[in-house]
């Protein structure tokens, strides 16, 4: 995973875009993580008969290959489905810039190399305008420096250290945690209540 | 010692160790899985050659995709999800409440019913409505599939401590106002997503006056605020609710340990007057687009910003409504009572009270899906099934999420308007193009009888 993400940004200002909209339920009946690109934003991208909806930004010739989205408030709210993040990645989205994100969606993102950048409303609105303009739609994001370069201006974004490290190093958190197995066992022996419950089969 | 919130006490009690960057490793006492967010976690575990850390700490249920008319999944893909979960549970020695099991049902209805939740626990589940367990003074939160894998492998999660918010609702409420209306009022007041990054504790006399079912409804829907955790302090009612259940013997707790200290401070506080709450109905496609029954829909002129105007136009367009229109009188095509928000025995009784001796309107399709098999059996013993069927509701013999997310064959058609006791009115949630109006189970019953959205209080009065 590189620390620099550069590419075209697309403006998608609708607020409260939930994970049902990002990945409609009919694509959830799968036991793998693959094959979700077509499902991503499916009802916004396609009509029921499968035609592309011209009004959706990622269907326009100029933004088809955008890898960065600038989004409305509370993006990724709702259901916990990680399929939403898998699908966005498979569609080629590397980063999303917004004011706030659904909590589970936020955690799911870093585990799949999707960078979520938090900025103020004023900055987001500026970036929406830049992303909507062919002259200024090329963004450059530096994860380590926590900056977005757009239209020759530099904006800072917020990101916790855990997220930053996860994106830069791309390490598997499960293996990292299992290096702490001795601490987990120590916790279990010190807290009998925590291990008392055994679910009846 | 400095005063601590209930949330802080719960996090502190489960801290295994600090992690670089300020996060914590927290211990998960109990973990629940369903058929659609767990498959990739099990396959991830296997691909990495890892095993389940403590198999007895997990429960799997089949609830999201199964049919409710008959037992199996409605299609091959659903059947595959169910058989895959069965295979994974067998292989890893994990308890499964599958189809046909008398303990089966919607995960968040089953867990309290079986006595699997108690004050002071940390519970995770690959489902956002895991906030429900806060009603018991337990820390419950939803996780994604990668985290499901992490819990299976290590019984822990990497956790970032949240900010804290207290929502105080005080005073008595008017007749006809339910727990559903209380949480909808909170969401309407604070805003969808306003609690992103927060753990929300509900307090005040209106909250403590709720029974456990009501407290669960409130904590359940707190995720619609963006809250990653919702809590209500444990009290005598909580303690009583933990007794005489299948797993009661597993828990040792003292309810007084699981409350916020009197002088604990919160990052944000919101106060709501219980007397200001009326029966509410959502009119749009976000759970904060809600109004008291008797109101007119908002108009563009009331919107402060162009973005708000745009959002209004989009929601009205999707919902097939126009600005300023009265909420009361909107014709419905379907009525649905179910979901982990409102399908407990108390919810069924409340709806049955309205339906008793009445018939639903012609042209309305009405479904009732009890939250669990045990709830259904209990309701049948009380004769509630007869009341629902006589009124014209379809009493479904199998339980599950059903039309809450419409992953099975209970789906609303394009353009159909649904009076629904569920938690999300998102675009497409109950079917492509389906138009959902959230409300309490009694309000759904009233709408089904009238054939349009109406005020449940008119019905109660006639009865009186
Ligand atoms: S009933 Fe609805 S909200 Fe609850 S777990 Fe099922 S799908 Fe999710």
Image (cartoon, coloured by chain):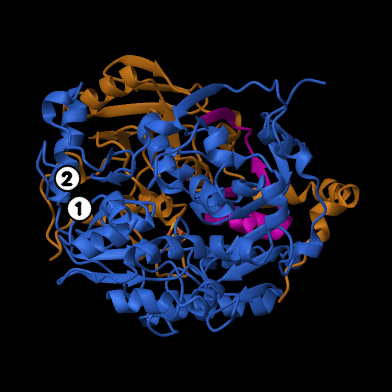
Chain colours: A orange, B blue
The Cα atoms of the two marked residues, 1 and 2, are separated by 6 Å
SS label for mark 1: helix
Q: Is B166 inside the magenta-drawn segment?
A: yes
SS label for mark 2: loop
Q: Nearer the viewer, residue B207 or A12?
A: B207
Residue B60 image offset from top left, x and y in percent: 60, 69
Q: Which residue is mark 2?
A: A56
Chain letter for mark 1? A
* Residue located at (47% from left, 52% from top): A80
In the rendered structure, the answer to whether residue B69 lies left or right of residue B166 reads left
Task: Identify whether B365 is placed above or below B133.
Answer: below
Instruction: Kindly give the residue lying farthest to the front in the view shown.
Output: B464
Mark 2, Cα crowd under 10 Å, few <14 / some 14-19 / many 20+, is some
The quarter of the picture where the N terminus of chain B appears is top right
Residue B255 image offset from top left, x and y in percent: 76, 44
Q: Nearer the viewer, residue B20 or B152?
A: B152
Q: Which residue is mark 1?
A: A45
The magenta stretch is: B140-168
Residue B121 image offset from top left, x and y in percent: 72, 49
């Amino acid at each position: 995973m590189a620390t620099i993400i550069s590419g075209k940004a697309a403006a998608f200002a609708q607020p409260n875009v939930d994970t049902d909209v990002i990945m409609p339920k009919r694509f959830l009946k799968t036991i793998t993580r693959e094959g979700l690109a077509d499902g991503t934003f499916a009802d916004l991208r396609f009509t029921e008969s499968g035609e592309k909806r011209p009004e959706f930004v990622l269907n326009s010739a100029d933004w088809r290959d955008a890898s960065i989205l600038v989004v409305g408030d509370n993006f990724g709210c709702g259901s916990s489905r990680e399929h939403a993040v898998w699908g966005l990645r498979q569609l080629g989205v590397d980063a999303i810039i917004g004011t706030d994100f659904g909590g589970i969606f936020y955690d799911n993102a870093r585990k799949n190399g999707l960078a979520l950048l938090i900025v103020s409303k004023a900055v987001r609105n500026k970036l929406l305008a830049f992303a909507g303009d062919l002259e200024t739609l090329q963004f450059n994001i530096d994860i380590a420096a926590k900056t977005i370069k757009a239209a020759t201006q530099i904006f800072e974004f917020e990101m916790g250290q855990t997220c930053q490290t996860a994106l830069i190093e791309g390490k598997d958190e499960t293996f990292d945690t299992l290096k702490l197995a001795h601490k987990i066992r120590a916790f279990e022996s010190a807290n009998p209540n925590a291990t008392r419950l055994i679910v009846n089969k | 010692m400095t005063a601590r919130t209930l949330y802080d006490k719960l996090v502190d009690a489960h801290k295994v160790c600090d992690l670089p960057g300020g996060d914590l490793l927290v211990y998960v006492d109990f973990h629940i899985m369903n058929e659609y967010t767990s498959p990739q976690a099990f396959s991830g575990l296997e691909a990495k050659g890892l095993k389940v850390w403590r198999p007895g700490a997990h429960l799997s249920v089949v609830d999201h995709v199964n049919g409710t008319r008959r037992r199996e999944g409605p299609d091959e893909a659903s059947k595959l999800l169910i058989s895959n979960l069965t295979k994974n549970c067998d292989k890893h020695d994990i308890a499964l409440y599958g189809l046909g099991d008398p303990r089966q049902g919607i995960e968040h209805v089953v867990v309290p019913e079986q006595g699997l939740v108690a004050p002071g626990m940390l519970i995770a589940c690959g489902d956002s409505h895991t906030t429900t367990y806060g009603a018991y003074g337990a820390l419950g939160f939803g996780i994604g599939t990668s985290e499901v894998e992490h819990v299976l492998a290590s019984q822990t999660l990497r956790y970032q401590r949240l900010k804290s918010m207290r929502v105080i609702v005080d005073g008595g409420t008017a007749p006809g106002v339910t727990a559903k209306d209380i949480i909808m009022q909170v969401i309407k007041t604070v805003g969808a997503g306003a609690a992103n990054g927060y753990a929300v504790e509900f307090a005040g006399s209106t909250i403590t006056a709720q029974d456990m079912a009501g407290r669960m409804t409130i904590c359940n829907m707190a995720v619609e605020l963006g809250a990653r955790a919702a809590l209500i302090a444990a009290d005598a009612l909580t303690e009583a609710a933990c007794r005489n259940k299948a797993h009661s013997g597993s828990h040792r707790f003292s309810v007084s340990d699981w409350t916020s200290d009197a002088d604990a401070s919160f990052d944000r506080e919101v106060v709501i007057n219980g007397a200001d709450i009326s029966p509410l109905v959502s009119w749009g496609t976000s759970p904060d687009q809600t109004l008291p029954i008797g109101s007119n829909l908002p108009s563009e002129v009331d919107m402060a910003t162009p973005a708000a105007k745009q959002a209004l136009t989009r929601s009205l367009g999707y919902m097939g409504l126009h600005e300023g229109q009265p909420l009361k009188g909107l014709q419905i095509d379907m009525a649905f009572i179910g979901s982990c928000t409102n399908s407990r025995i108390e919810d069924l009784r409340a709806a049955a009270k309205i339906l008793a001796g009445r018939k639903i309107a012609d042209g309305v399709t009405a479904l009732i899906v009890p939250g669990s098999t045990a709830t259904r059996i209990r309701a049948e013993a009380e004769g509630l099934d007869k009341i629902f069927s006589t009124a014209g509701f379809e009493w479904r013999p199998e339980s599950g999420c059903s039309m809450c997310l419409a992953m099975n064959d209970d789906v609303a058609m394009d353009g159909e308007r649904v009076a629904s006791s569920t938690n999300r009115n998102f675009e497409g949630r109950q079917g492509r193009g389906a138009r959902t109006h959230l409300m309490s189970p009694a309000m759904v019953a009233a709408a089904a009888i009238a054939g349009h959205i109406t005020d449940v209080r008119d019905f109660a009065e006639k009865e009186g």
